[in-house]
Image (cartoon, grey):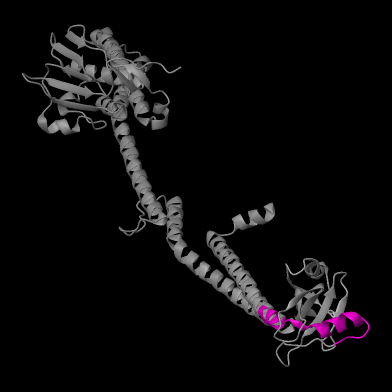
């Protein structure tokens, strides 16, 4: 059975659908045919039983007595009230099963316990069954209580207690009719099953046509990596294949967009890496040439070159770290998401910001607020916002930080961001022309936007009243930490 099931599952879907349709139709047709055959059989037997019951009239007492007295030596005639010309088995049966056959009977019908029981029940039962005669021919037998006319025709019939009347007719014609009906039903069923199989195969092919198109599209994408392939879908169609096609189109669109973003990221990263690498190579070549030629570089210039190399290496390390942060998958982030105190993250970021801008005055007003986020990513996002404020604040300036009701605002008093540049501040590798001389990779605010969005919040940059820029971060959460689950 398991081998058959495995072979069935190895067939194409359209073949399996056709076989399943054919099997379902075969089962239904077989059930209907068998039911029809049994209904017809019951009706035919019922008609025969009705004819036999009509023939079981009260018998003359003298004929019955003569038949029983001579039984089984000399058959006596029992009046036959059945249809003229029809074959009839007519006999009496005693309580011990002895058959007393009428002289005008077609033959002798074999008795059984049900016939004897009719005699024993004294007129309270009758028996209708299939049986055989002494030659083995099938007959329909009706055994009824024996009533006799003791005072001639017209008198009140009386029950004869010691015998029962058995009337039977051959079932040859009935069985012939049933056999012909079975053959017809078998032929009709066969035609129906074959037709159902053909129809199922046609329906399966028509139904699988969109799947074939989808398969061809998938194979084309796998072979050519062409993500611009789209499967045409009717707008009003809502079946499973249409939903699958729409899902495939959405998937290829998302993959194409992801690949474009990946290519753009690689191109932008290569462009950003080229500048510090070129500077590093130039500085290292100068130091190497000085060693090779024996011409020492003045100490001040040497220190400047080494400081530049160190700065470029720091910038490269920062850029690589930012790229790693952006390349992390959603699943990697989701594994480390937990309830985090935004107040603690801001305080930690403030400590780092004060070290980077010791000449600045940083004013903080923080209230408790708890969010669901990745702790390291959340702190890095706040650090990036504060770094921008420190970077663009004038010497001796002030940075104002406030956290109230899940809204974090960081305001600096620097030159601000031009209005036409505000829509681009969260783009990857985008840097304002005025800030390109400053250190940075152009990924800091992009990381901020991604981290805040993953935490379910929003981040905006806008002009501050009186000059400068104000960054606003809104994160969903609560002022108190939720209780820990045991």
Q: Which residues are magenta?
A: 50-76
Residue at far left of view: 466
Q: Position of residue 453 (x, y in %)?
A: 28, 29
Can you give x and y, in whole percent of width and height, for residue 126 in the image? 73, 70
Classify 36 as above or below 281.
Answer: below
336 or 155: nearer the viewer: 155
Is 461 situated left or right of 177 in this image? Answer: left
Q: Vertically, is 389 above or below 95?
A: above
* Residue situated in front as seen by the camera: 267 or 29: 29
Q: Spot the residue most to the right.
A: 73
- Quarter of the view holding residue 387: top left
Residue 63 part of the magenta-drawn span: yes
Q: Quadrant of residue 320?
A: top left
Q: Could you tell me which residue is drawn at 44 percent across and 53 percent down? A: 218
Depth check: 39 or 472 in front? 39
Q: Nearer the viewer, residue 382 or 263?
A: 382
Residue 246 picture location, percent across and down: 36, 52
Q: Quadrant of residue 167?
A: bottom right
């Amino acid at each position: 059975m398991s081998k058959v099931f495995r072979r069935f599952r190895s067939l194409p879907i359209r073949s399996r659908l056709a076989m399943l349709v054919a099997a379902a139709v075969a089962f239904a047709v077989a059930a209907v045919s068998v039911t029809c055959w049994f209904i017809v059989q019951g009706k035919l037997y019922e008609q025969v039983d009705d004819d036999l019951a009509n023939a079981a009239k009260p018998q003359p007492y003298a004929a019955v007595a003569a038949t029983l007295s001579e039984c089984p030596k000399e058959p006596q005639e029992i009046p036959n009230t059945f249809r003229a010309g029809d074959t009839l088995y007519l006999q009496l049966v005693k309580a011990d099963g002895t058959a007393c056959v009428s002289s005008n009977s077609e033959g002798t019908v074999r008795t059984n316990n049900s016939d004897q029981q009719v005699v024993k029940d004294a007129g309270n039962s009758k028996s209708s069954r299939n049986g055989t005669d002494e030659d083995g021919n099938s007959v329909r037998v009706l055994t009824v209580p024996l009533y006799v006319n003791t005072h001639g025709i017209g008198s009140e019939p009386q029950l004869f207690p010691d015998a029962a009347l058995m009337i039977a007719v051959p079932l040859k014609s009935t069985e012939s009719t049933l056999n012909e009906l079975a053959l017809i039903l078998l032929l009709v069923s066969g035609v129906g099953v074959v037709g159902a199989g053909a129809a199922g195969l046609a329906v399966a092919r028509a139904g699988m046509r969109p799947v074939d198109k989808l398969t061809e599209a998938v194979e084309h994408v796998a072979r050519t990596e062409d993500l611009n392939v789209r499967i045409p879908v009717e707008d009003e169609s809502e079946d499973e294949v249409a939903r699958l096609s729409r899902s495939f189109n959405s998937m290829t669109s998302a993959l194409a967009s992801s690949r474009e973003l990946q290519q753009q990221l690689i191109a932008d990263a290569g462009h950003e890496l080229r500048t510090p690498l070129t500077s590093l190579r130039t500085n290292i070549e100068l130091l190497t040439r000085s060693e090779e030629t024996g011409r020492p570089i003045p100490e001040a210039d040497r220190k400047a070159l080494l400081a530049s190399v160190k700065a470029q290496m720091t910038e490269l390390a920062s850029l690589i770290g930012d790229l790693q942060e952006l390349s992390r998958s959603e699943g990697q982030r989701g594994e480390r998401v937990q309830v985090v105190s935004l107040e603690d993250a801001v305080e930690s970021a403030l400590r780092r910001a004060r070290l980077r801008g010791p000449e600045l005055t940083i004013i903080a007003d923080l209230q408790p607020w708890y969010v669901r986020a990745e702790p390291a990513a959340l702190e890095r996002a706040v650090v990036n916002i504060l770094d921008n404020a420190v970077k663009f604040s004038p010497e001796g300036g002030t940075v104002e930080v406030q956290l109230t009701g899940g809204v974090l605002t960081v305001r600096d008093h620097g030159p601000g961001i031009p209005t036409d540049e505000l829509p681009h501040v969260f783009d990857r590798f985008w840097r304002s022309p005025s800030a390109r001389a400053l250190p940075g990779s152009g990924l800091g605010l992009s990381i901020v936007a991604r981290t805040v969005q993953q935490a379910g919040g929003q981040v905006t940059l806008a002009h501050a009243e009186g000059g400068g820029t104000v960054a606003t971060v809104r994160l969903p959460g609560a002022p108190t930490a939720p209780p820990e689950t045991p």
